Amino acid sequence: MTQRISRRKILSAAIKAGAGLAIWNLAPSLTVGLLPRSASASTKDDKRFHAAFARLDEFIAAHLRDMGAPGMTLALATREGLLRASTYGFADQKAGAKVQPNTLFEIGSISKSFVALALMQMREEGRFDPSQPITTYLPWLKIDSKYAPITGHHLLSHTAGLPDGVVLELIGPDQPLWTGFAPGEHFAYSNVGYDLLGHVLEAIDRQPLAAVLRRRVLDPLGMSSSEPVIANTIRPRMAVGYAPMFDDRPFPLRGTLAEAPWVEVGEGAGSVSSTATDMGTYLTMLINRGAVRGTSPTVREGSKGNRLINEDSFELFTAPAIKAPFWGEDASYGYGLWTSETEGRTILRHTGGMVAFSSAMHVDVTSGIAAFASVNANLAGYRPNVVAKYALDLLRTTIDGKTLPTAPKTNTIPDQISNAADFAGTFTSTDGTKLGLAADGNKLFLAIRNQRVALESAGPNRFFVKHPDFELFLLEFGRDHNAVVEAFHGPRWFTNDRYAGLRTFQYPKEWDAFAGHYRNDSPWFGSTRIFVRKGTLTAEGTPLTPLGGGVFRAGAEEWSPERISFSPVVNGRAPRMKFSGVEFYRTFTP
């Protein structure tokens, strides 16, 4: 399982979509000792919220313990400003160092809203027009496309049709960017789009991205502890980040974490790091629709006081551009933010994932409250949305004078499977290998030689099997008219006596030369496995559709812009694979 579920989702967005591992409650467990309710807290003296804070601290302590997250930083804000900045757990497990108020956390893709705000300022100055082709500002950019030109609006709203995780620096005159659909037709999250917008900022202001973001966003807001790019110089101030020890397999509950590699990040898709106090200031600006509290000389003077951007720009910034679910909930995407109307309230949200950090930001503009939470670990798709959402629920009920809500359930029991009986029975592969599964109440067991191994849920019809023979892939099941009829484990396919479909499949035999385990040494990319299953070439189960010329489309959607190609075959095997511009090499491990 490639654990690159972060700023660049090259394999999780297209390939790993079929693996179903980005489940918030399926995360590792570390021995973190007794987590303090709040290692450090700065709170406005508003006695109304004391009970809410106590309830929130209790929930977070339990949540971090059950999720296995080493530490967390949290900011709560109202229209009046920072309400509370609190920190929990450890910034460095090995040293036993707790998270402090000045500890930096990488906020990941929440940085996209910073880029969008800077561009809204340039729009007010008449220097940036979202409706203009992006090549107006980046004349060197080459895009191989049969569709209409991509505009700034398309990049800001993830509707450009560009691939997600391609490294822009790998694109040159001999390999232009490409599109999968006509701009504006679909929502397809693309980090490279925001990397391009970072270049637009540099081209217009004729300064490095770090200088642009600091001058246009951080300094006007007084976010003096925040950093616009992640460079080695700030590493002593950054929390130590953690990631799964093994990057090539599914990551179950109580999996093993290890210190993650340090990575410098200077692109527009996710380069900002911040503290809880500074993020409280950012939240306050969003609640106030671009207005800034305070008298910073770098803040613009508007008709209604100091502002980062004017009302018209804020409307454009948060206007729904295209329908785009937010973690399964109904929402639309604007410019660097998800936006939705929930029970008459306007909610702005975004998450951020890095190699070793996971963040969430929720802003209730109507109620005038907001929350930001970040943990110093990459927990296989987890984002602390449940923390931010519960914090808002507590603040909202306090303001409304209602009973505080019960905390969300945080202690998961992964081997409790309510529909375990659906999967019981014998499944047989074409070579005669059998899988025997038995249900015992709400538990499901797989017979492996002389053992009975309890399966743990990884989402609907998908399970972790904690046994060496099954650790590289999930055990997945297929249904026909809601009856379970087949099972998959990597390239292996099994059926039971209810299966009534085809049992033999034809495919080009040259595909066998592509099968194998491929790796990129960057922690952003990790590894993936290519194999043929039921006559279809797949990337860990996600179908690859041949487009001709040795190129395959990755993903089930006909409009997916992700592309895979393989190097010429040597001695019966392709030694390299290219995924959306990024080179992977065949490794000797299975």
Image: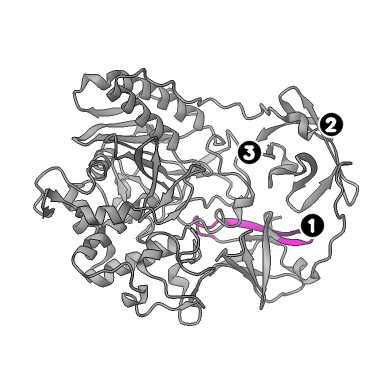
Q: Quadrant of the C terminus?
A: bottom right
Residue 84: in magenta span: no
Q: Which residues are magenta?
A: 521-537
Which badge, 2 or 1, is on the more N-terminal residue? 2
Residue 376's quadrant in the figure? top left
Q: Nearer the viewer, mark 2 or mark 3?
A: 3
Q: Nearer the viewer, mark 2 or mark 1?
A: 1
Q: Which mark is residue 450?
A: 2
Rounded to the nearest whole Å, what is the CA distance between mark 1 and mark 3?
Answer: 23 Å
- Check contact, mark 2 vs mark 3: CB within 8 A: no
Residue carrying label 3: 458
Residue carrying label 1: 534
Rounded to the nearest whole Å, what is the CA distance between mark 2 and mark 1?
Answer: 30 Å
Tell me: 154 left or right of 29: left
Q: Specify the amino acid type for callout 2.
A: Asn
Q: Residues within 10 Å of mark 3 (few under 14, many from 20)?
A: many
From the viewer's side, name the closer residue of 367 and 514: 367
From the viewer's side, name the closer residue of 498 and 576: 498
- Check contact, mark 2 vs mark 1: CB within 8 A: no
The answer to whether residue 95 shows anywhere in this view is no
**Residue 155's spot in the image, x, y percent?**
40, 64
